[in-house]
């Protein structure tokens, strides 16, 4: 029997056998692993050895249709792309998808599947970014607790005036150049 072990979006192992997906259920007393169908009301089960390399027995009493290859391939691509997008925020989504398509057969995928995967990647990346402040108070509070520096570790935030609502960003070099030309004296 030819089966494939894939990883779910929650980082759990899943077995794909004859178009049906099985999730891990329990470890038996003798060390074998029991797997059950991912559809809740389905009673189908399989049993594998502890290394998930051989299927020892199976009870195929499915009360539903098989998963089509497109759904399984789309799921594999989505899991791969979401994991890579979370790990490497600088990598372009199209490059991640192309790398994922090398591992997953792209024969049955549609363009809307790729668009769906791309949107899922953007959602994962947005979760890793901080939320935008909702008010002026939040902006001033944010900059009080967060040092804003240039690449040369100079102070870049010069003024954070909460009362007047003024925030000035500039480097010390620019500030010293302004002192003689535009302003009588800066502090």
Image (cartoon, rainbow, N blue to C red):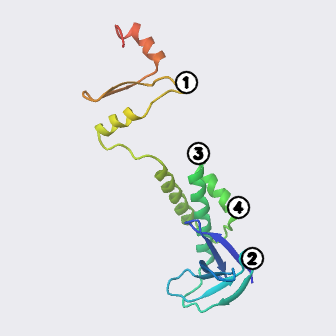
Label 1 vs 4, first from the N-terminus: 4
**Circle number at residue 152:** 1
Rendering quarter of residue 104: bottom right
Residue at 59% from the left image edge and 92% from the top image edge: 61
Front residue (pair 142, 65): 142
Label 2 vs 4, first from the N-terminus: 2
Circle 4: element type: helix
Structural distance between the alpha carbons of marks 1 and 4: 41 Å
- 154 left or right, relative to 31: left
Could you tell me if residue 109 is visible in this image? Answer: no
Structural distance between the alpha carbons of marks 2 and 3: 36 Å
Residue at 35% from the left image edge and 9% from the top image edge: 185
Q: Callout 3: few (<14), some (14-19), or many (20+) C-alpha neighbours within 10 Å? A: few
Circle 1: element type: loop
Query: Which residue is the site of mark 3?
Result: 90
Q: Tell me residue 98's x, y (percent).
A: 65, 57
Question: Closer to us: mark 1 or mark 4?
Answer: 1
Query: Which residue is the site of mark 4?
Result: 102
Quarter of the image for the C terminus: give it.
top left
Quarter of the image for the N terminus: give it.
bottom right
> Exactly how many numbered labels are in the figure?
4
Vertical comparison of 20 with 101: above or below: below
Label 1 vs 3, first from the N-terminus: 3
Query: Which residue is the site of mark 2?
Result: 53
């Amino acid at each position: 029997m030819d089966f494939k072990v894939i990883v779910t979006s929650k980082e759990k192992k899943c077995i794909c056998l004859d178009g049906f997906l099985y999730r891990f259920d329990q470890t038996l007393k003798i060390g074998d692993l029991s797997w059950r169908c991912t559809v809740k009301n389905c009673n189908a089960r399989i049993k594998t050895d502890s290394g998930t390399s051989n299927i020892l027995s199976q009870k195929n009493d499915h009360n539903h249709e098989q998963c089509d290859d497109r759904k399984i391939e789309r799921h594999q691509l989505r899991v791969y792309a979401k994991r890579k997008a979370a790990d490497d925020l600088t990598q372009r989504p199209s490059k991640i998808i192309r790398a994922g398509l090398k591992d997953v057969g792209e024969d049955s995928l549609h363009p809307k599947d790729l668009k769906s995967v791309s949107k899922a990647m953007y959602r994962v990346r947005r979760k890793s970014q901080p939320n935008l402040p909702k008010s002026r108070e939040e902006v001033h509070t944010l900059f009080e607790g967060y040092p804003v520096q240039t690449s040369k570790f100079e102070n870049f935030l010069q003024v954070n005036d909460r009362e007047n609502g003024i925030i000035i960003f500039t480097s010390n070099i620019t500030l010293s150049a302004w002192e003689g030309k535009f302003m009588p004296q800066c502090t």
